[in-house]
Image (cartoon, rainbow, N blue to C red):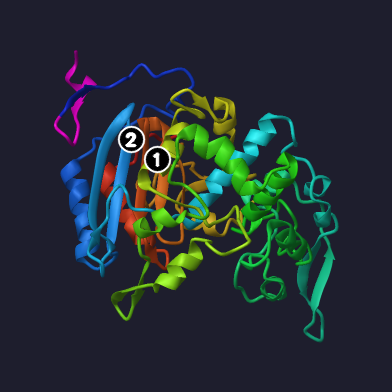
Amino acid sequence: MRKQDVQITRRGVLQVLPWAMAPGVMAQTGAAAEEVKLDARRMDAALGRLVQEERTAGASLLIWKDGGEAYFGTAGYADREAGRRMSRNSIGQFYSMTKPVTGVSLMRLWEQGKFGLDDPLYRHLPEFERMRVYTGKDAAGGPLYRPASRPITVRDIMRHTAGFAYGTGDTPVHRAYAEADPLALDIDLEEMGRRLAKVPLLFDPGSACRYSIAVDVQALLVQVLSGQKFAEFVRQNVFEPLGMRDSAWRQPDERLPRLAAVYRKTDGKLVRDPDEEIRKRNFRDNRLTGGGSGLSSTIDDYMRFARMLLNGGSLEGARILKPSTVKLMATNQLDPRITDRGFVNSKGAMGFGMDFAVRVAQPQRPEENRGAVGEFFWDGAASTLFWVDPANRMAAVFLTQKMPFDGTLHRDVRAAVYGPEYLGPRGD
């Protein structure tokens, strides 16, 4: 047996690496990859620095590679004031890492023939039939609108090319979005859709890529097509088959003591959010169960989701998606003519698939996040992150609760995982 066919785990156990990949596992992409050499001391030190430098109160990192757990490490606190350390048992709020879960749920219905990716959205959600697009202002400074050049498609809401707004901005569309308040916590998904459909679009569908409320529309679509409440569909079709026992939009009372506190950098110091704010974000007393945020989970639970994706849609005998469906979701869906890509460009050499960013080229700049061509990933507002790296047969989940979003944490964690000079396969 070759030396490179074995490794030492964090617990000092010698294990054989399963290089002969099981059927359905996603294959390496691009040219022959530069193999990642994980260094536990480097990763331990990186997590420790994040806490020591007051960049976050606590963090944990879990890596699965070559069919087994390759690393787990923690630093700091889930609740610093209570003296509760970050642990595998800590429940974090994943915010936008809810989005890939929603996308997988919707694609289960696609596999069942419930819709086509290029169906007009209004075929299933009639309120979105007659959308208007903002085109500028008239001589008096009033907004000008015209009918959209084509309907929004289901594919558009999965790759953020629908034209929807999201949050604040300086256009009349953003002001209309704020007034409609489609993500108000006291409404349900149906009312969300009705409110959003009255808000004009920022651009013609398919002409640009802007991060948006589109994944909440996906949740509404899941609900309409399945005939079930969105959270119930996800529980039955994703969480239970994968054994994700600690994942939910509304955590039961007995789990609330395990919720990690959220910390904000204020005047150079980390300040803990009040308990009532943490409870509110757990959607405890809210009607809205959104597809774009709201999920809370443990690092191990989310890793089960990531492992399913790495394995081509299945985990331990539970088939969630076909390998071809996972590959489709993890393939860049942006036409080269879509040059206005907004948030995607901020992530590095990326395209966008279906609810995942997708690396399409090697890191271009020294300050860019390390990673391999073909990886797909997403992150969350509290600076959480996960990625799936088929080239290295690896998945990673990073859990912290730092607001506002701090991409420098991801840069340093990825550098610790891959090594600061790692480029990986060329992908051509």
Q: Which residue corresponds to the image point at 50% horizontal and 67% vertical from the top-left?
A: 280
Q: Which residue is mark 2?
A: 64
Q: Which residue is mark 1?
A: 303
Q: Is residue 337 visible?
A: no
Residue 50: give its label.
Answer: none
| Residue extending furthest toward the left | 12
- Magenta-highlighted residues: 1-12
Residue 113 vertical placement versus 62 (above, below) = above
Which quarter of the rendering shows the N terminus?
top left
Choose between 301 and 359: the one closer to the eye: 301
**Residue at left offset 77%, top offset 84%:** 141
* Residue at 38% over, 53% down: 91
Residue 295 position, x and y percent, is 50, 53
Q: Is residue 192 magenta?
A: no
Q: Specify which label sits upstream in the sequence, 2 or 1.
A: 2
Pick the front one: 121 or 254? 254
Helix or strand or loop: what does disc 1 sit on?
Answer: helix
Tell which residue pokes out farthest to the bottom in this image: 140
> Does 267 sit left or right of 322 as displayed?
left
